[in-house]
Image (cartoon, rainbow, N blue to C red):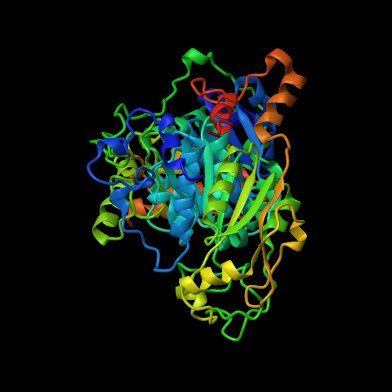
Amino acid sequence: MTTTQTRGHAGRSAGEPAAPAEAAGPVNPVERYLRKDRLPHIWCAGCGIGTSVNCFTRAVDSCGIPLDKIAVVSGIGCTGRVAGYLNVDSFHTTHGRPLPFATGLKLAGPGQKVVVYSGDGDLVAIGGNHLIHACRRNVDLTVICVNNFTYGMTGGQVAPTTPVDAIATTTPYGNLEEPFNLPHLVDSSGAVYVARWTTYHVRQLQKSIAEAMRKRGFSFVEVLSPCPTLYGRRNRLGDGLAMQRLFKDRCVVKNGALTREADFDLGGSGPIPVGTFVNRDRPAFLDRYSALMRKELGDRFVPFGRPDAEEHTEAAHWVGAEG
Amino acid sequence: MDGDHAAAEGALAAGCRFAAGYPITPSTEIVERLAARFPLVGGLFVQMEDEIASSIAIQGAVWGGVKAMTVSSGPGMSLMMEHIGYAVMTETPCVFVDVQRAGPSTGLPTLPAQADMMQARWGPHGDCPAVALCPNSPQEAFDLTITAFNLAERFRTPVLLMMDECVGHMLEKVVIPAAEEIEIEPRRYTDKGPGEYVPYRAGDDLVPAMSRVGLGHRFHVTGLTHDERGYPAMSADVHDRLVRRLVAKVARAADDIAFHEADGIDGADVLVLSYGITSRVAARAIECAREGGTRVGHLRLKTIWPFPDRLVERALSGVRAAVVPELNLGQISLEVQRVAAGRTRVVPVTHAGGAVHQPAAIEGAIAEAAR
């Protein structure tokens, strides 16, 4: 993965920014993936969301997916702002609802690679019902869920991912509720690809996002991320660097591990399982739909989609084209 | 064909090719029909996990490049309000069908009401434009569903079709014209290329041209207050300009889209203003009153929102009083009172829903109004 910077250029379509070679001076390899007129971003020093975005852009680069073929959908919250910084067709939807929006978007435009990029509160609390049903429905979507154990945008409230006993503004005496083990939740709901990494594991995370994007069906990558301002500070976990060190010291790579054994206690001292836990095949929604309707209706079946839309199968051409 | 099925056929005729919904009486027959018909015409229905998901899935589909709608009734409509606001703010053309039943809450699931009329106007938070149409027959359910899609595309805003349980389940003859006889408003995509396209810059009609995913425009869509580029802009000035444009693009076309039916308005002493299923009961009451010698005019509104102020003002001029029957405790009668501004007496004929009025109730109100 060290030469990924140039691979995506083969997929460049008309109208994209000039190649780095034409620009004066050194150019950041992921710059063309960002809306530079939207920078600086809103994230705090030490926050891990930017690191995850860096990994995402490099993953896209390594897949060779043209930028015009990607749509990113976010919900509300700190991670919800990711869509606005990426130089692709992007949607900042309502709180908790990026998944149903992305479902409609992907089904209507199957030639697009649709990525849902949002936080744990958005996807798992208010959007939790949509999450389990999206897994079950198996529409061809990739979810990147940045889990920072709290609601950052609103000032550090308790989340369904907050460890027991942790201090949040709405649990000033400690959290009573057990957090979700996200890989187990989405695995048991039917996701075909499930991985967890942290913002410390940038190489693995980049590779995992690329794998998830190539996977046909519902793929889910959890990214454990520091929120030093609103979580780390209150829970004596130190600054962003200290939380990176925590990830380095306590994470154990367990590829293929049973997701029900992937839970951990951030506030304790035990291991934090990371890795690619699930990678299996199950027919994606639209593939199953087309097969069923062809069987039931024969020639009377008219496949879904805009008349001018690329065939769903064409998307597989680049989705499978790893360099 | 019943009104629910007619609305489904109207959607197909209008070019709708994606629907998402969640089962709820008395609207479900619409999506049942679409689920059966869509695979034959290149459409797709998805039954989502709830109404919240349905009301945003259709908007994803719209940005994917198709026409889309969702369908519900009272409790489901309440859940959809946030996303009607999202469609307003992001200027996503889409159609919501509300087959009204009696509320509040679960109320009377299988029985009619017209009690969501103000929800259709004021349901989403913030200052929103509202476009809502109200059919009184299966034929009109077909016709006005097409109109709803056309208005959604014309203004780039959500449009509500406000049916009720009676119209939804009423069986009547529906004439479906040949496709070439049906006027369809196409989506107005930008002709500007990447780099030239400014997603939320509007021309004289205040409606910006649209894009969809995959055209290379790399646009950003957000429910946050945004500038012409679509980028979040947290300032009172930008917000004021944006919200005033969103409201004005519909408000200034109000006269143009004031669809209605007028009967015997000129020279009338009493005006009956009605809409939806209630208009059919009112027609019987008016017939009886006329037989008794009272000069009664009938104005039936098909467009409820934007409220047709000037049309109603003209109809009110010269009458002694206006009678407004509706299956709620007085919603549209408030609008009539606003337009009358104290110059004309307004007599609401209220009914909490669960049945239609007895014609005698409306006839009695006409008699009182004529005194």
* Coordinates of residue A231 in the picture (x, y in percent): 52, 75
Q: Return the residue nearer the eye: A57 or B106.
A: A57
Q: How many marks?
A: 0
Left-right relation of B220 to A69: left
Q: Is residue B131 in view from this perspective?
A: no
Residue A222, placed above or below residue B35: below
Q: Quadrant of residue A128?
A: bottom right
* Coordinates of residue B257 in the picture (x, y in percent): 37, 34
Q: Which quarter of the figure is the N terminus of chain B placed in?
A: top right
Quick one: which residue is furthest to the front in this view?
A2
Q: Is residue A196 in view from this perspective?
A: yes
Residue at 36 percent across and 29 percent down: it is B189
Q: Return the residue nearer the eye: B242 or B265.
A: B242
Left-right relation of B46 to B320: right
Q: Quadrant of residue A183?
A: bottom right
* Coordinates of residue B220 in the picture (x, y in percent): 38, 45
Residue at 26 percent across and 34 percent down: it is B196
Residue A259, placed above or below residue B40: below
* Coordinates of residue B315 in the picture (x, y in percent): 36, 40
Residue at 61 percent across and 20 percent down: it is B41
Residue B327, placed above or below residue B9: below
Left-right relation of A48 to A14: right
